[in-house]
Image (tube, grey):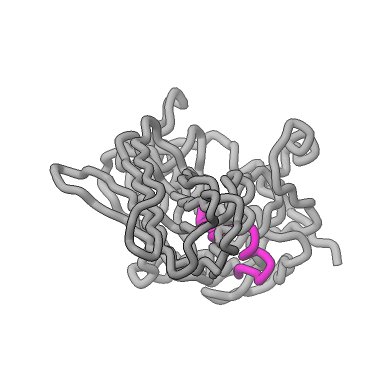
Amino acid sequence: MNKYFIRPLAAALFSFIAVPAAAQVAPDGGFSSPLKCTLDQDCWILNVPDADRSGARAQDHRCGLRTYNGHKGTDFAIRDFRTLDGGADVLAAGPGLVTAARDGADEYFKQTAETRKLIGRKACGNGVIIEHKGGWESQYCHLRKGTIAVRLGDRVKRGDVLGKVGMSGRTEFPHVHVEFRVGGKTIDPFTGEAVGAGCNRPQRPVWAKESGIRYPGFALYAAGFTDHTPTADRIRSSARSPISLARHAPGLVLWAAMFGIQSGDVLKLRILDPTGAAVAVREVRFDRSQAWRMEASGRRMPASGWAPGNWKGEAQLQRFVNGRTVNRSIIVPLIIK
């Protein structure tokens, strides 16, 4: 069955807004997460709204860099494309009435000039708009083609499934983009003020307290082994590690994938053989901020092959905050047969 928007979803993503005088109060105790997941375990906040009204630079509500220029929503990302196969449910953030729904937009797993032309003004892709109490509405973008589970005029409860995370519209990573509006103004859910109100402003979040949603930290969200240097597309496709590799594998490479990198962060990678000796060591100090980053370290197979037994990879991401070091670490086991 065809589903239509009564107004273009994409228009809400790019419209200019005025700044309200005070923070807005969300209905029904606030909004919940739009993804069925555990935050910082199997989903992560990738970007938040841009608080800079000038358009000259991107800056989030904390004067940080977890955003990009003109961004008006909050992006909840899943681990990789492989997660899409099992289906990642997009949920209604609060009770209300479905006032718009679109399905049928194609999905593109790599953005090019050609795909951007095909997408055109449908940057949101497949999605849903819900009207809530008090003139509020929420919008959900980039859903998977053919999974929209609601129709125009449906009543939904908090947590009802709207569809599944996809790659429709203008996106380069599997995530759901959610926006909140009231009185025609797009609201930053972390401050309760209009998007573009500036940074370091008083904060009155519209997230429900029990949602556990908070300002995104940096994340070392996946690490693993492979027998060759992986591409970024390979890790975006499947951020998983094999249980074992053959003794005569052509190479042994440890990779690490991260969200929310800032200039000055340090990544340390080590591969340890069955005796505990380090056979590959790499340290990377990042010189710019990035929403997503992948790095790898390894070596080619020695003439005698890899020593059989239990190997280990160590990935550690460090950030220096107010004179202290904050670490994110992953240990990756591997059996060489």
The one of 150 and 174 positioned closer to us in this rendering: 174
Specify the quadrant that holds the N terminus.
bottom right
Foreground: 46 or 188? 46
The answer to whether residue 9 is left or right of residue 119 is left
The answer to whether 116 is drawn above or below residue 219 in the figure is above
Residue at position x 50%, y 43% in the image: 72
Residue at the extreme left: 323
Q: Is residue 26 visible?
A: yes
Residue 164, percent from left and from top:
65, 66
Residue 129 pos. (x, y %): 63, 58
- Of residues 214 and 257, the one nearer the viewer is 257
Res. 289 image quadrant:
top left
User: Relative to residue 119, is residue 81 depicted above or below?
Assistant: below
Is residue 135 among what the camera can see? no
| Residue visible at 56% across and 76% down in the picture | 157
- The residue segment tinted magenta is 75-89
x and y, in percent, of residue 20 in the image = 39, 41
Q: Position of residue 268 (x, y in %)?
A: 34, 47
Q: Quadrant of the C terminus?
A: bottom right
Q: Image quadrant of residue 328?
A: bottom left
Is 77 covered by the magenta stretch?
yes
Furthest residue in direction right, as rendered: 1
User: Is residue 82 part of the magenta span, yes or no?
Assistant: yes
Q: Residue at x 29, y 47 (%)?
A: 318
| Residue at the limit of the structure toward the top, as seen here | 56
Count numbered badges in the picture.
Answer: 0
221 up-or-down from 157: above or below? above
Residue at point 28%, 50% (across, down)? 203
